[in-house]
């Protein structure tokens, strides 16, 4: 089986990861940090607001079972892409909404997806989601991996 990867940031990575793990066709996930300029960051570094990194989820998926477009639909549905550097009570640049594309096809699909949502006025406010080329993805500390699953808590979205 050939797999593909996608990287999304949509607030605290615990809930984002929990939502993607439920999706049929998703093989695995890992949470980490990307989009900044600090080498091998830790959670403490990222929370300092000095690294430029976002909390993100790397999704490995089977493209014969789910498409990148369908993953984008999940992404848009699990957070509020109109709040700048904030999701719920979490505030800071590490909680920004972003799609980190891995190739030109992902870039085009992400941009088209965002444009469609804006055209159809799905959200009452302007979408602030960044669409950026993927940079180094730094795996977060082990205790962050599948955090909510480990604690047997259910994550419920309001969007």
Image (cartoon, rainbow, N blue to C red):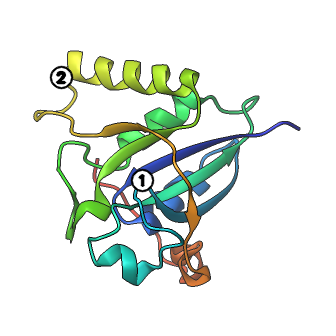
Residue found 56% across the figure and 57% down from its top:
137
Q: Is residue 135 above or below residue 74?
A: below
Depth check: give the residue in front, 109 or 153: 109
Disc 2 crowd, CA 10 A, few/some/many (<14, 14-19, 20+):
few
- Image coords of residue 10 (percent x, y): 36, 53
Quick check: 46 left or right of 158?
right
Q: Which of the marked residues, 1 or 2, is nearer the chain's N terminus?
A: 1
User: Is the C-beta separation of discs 1 and 2 under 8 Å?
Assistant: no
Disc 1 crowd, CA 10 A, few/some/many (<14, 14-19, 20+):
many
Residue found 53% across the figure and 77% down from its top:
144
Residue found 22% across the figure and 22% down from its top:
118
Residue located beneath label 1 in the image: 35
Q: Is residue 129 above or below residue 115?
A: below
Quick check: 138 left or right of 53?
right
Q: Could you say which disc has been placed on residue 146 in the image?
A: none
Q: Could you say which disc has been placed on residue 121 in the image?
A: 2
Q: Quadrant of the N terminus?
A: top right
């Amino acid at each position: 089986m050939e797999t593909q990867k996608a990287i999304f940031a949509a607030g605290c990575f615990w809930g984002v990861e929990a939502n993607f793990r439920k999706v049929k066709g998703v093989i695995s996930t890992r949470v980490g940090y990307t989009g900044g300029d600090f080498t091998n960051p830790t959670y403490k570094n990222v929370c300092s607001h000095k690294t430029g990194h976002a909390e993100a989820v790397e999704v490995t998926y089977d493209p014969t079972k789910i498409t990148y477009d369908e993953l984008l639909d999940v992404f848009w549905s699990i957070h509020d892409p109109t709040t700048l550097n904030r999701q719920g009570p979490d505030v800071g640049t590490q909680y920004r909404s972003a799609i980190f594309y891995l190739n030109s096809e992902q870039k085009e699909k992400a941009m088209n997806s965002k444009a469609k949502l804006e055209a159809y006025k799905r959200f009452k406010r302007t979408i602030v989601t960044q669409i950026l080329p993927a940079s180094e993805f730094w795996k977060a500390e082990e205790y962050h991996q599948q955090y909510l699953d480990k604690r047997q808590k259910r994550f419920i979205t309001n969007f």
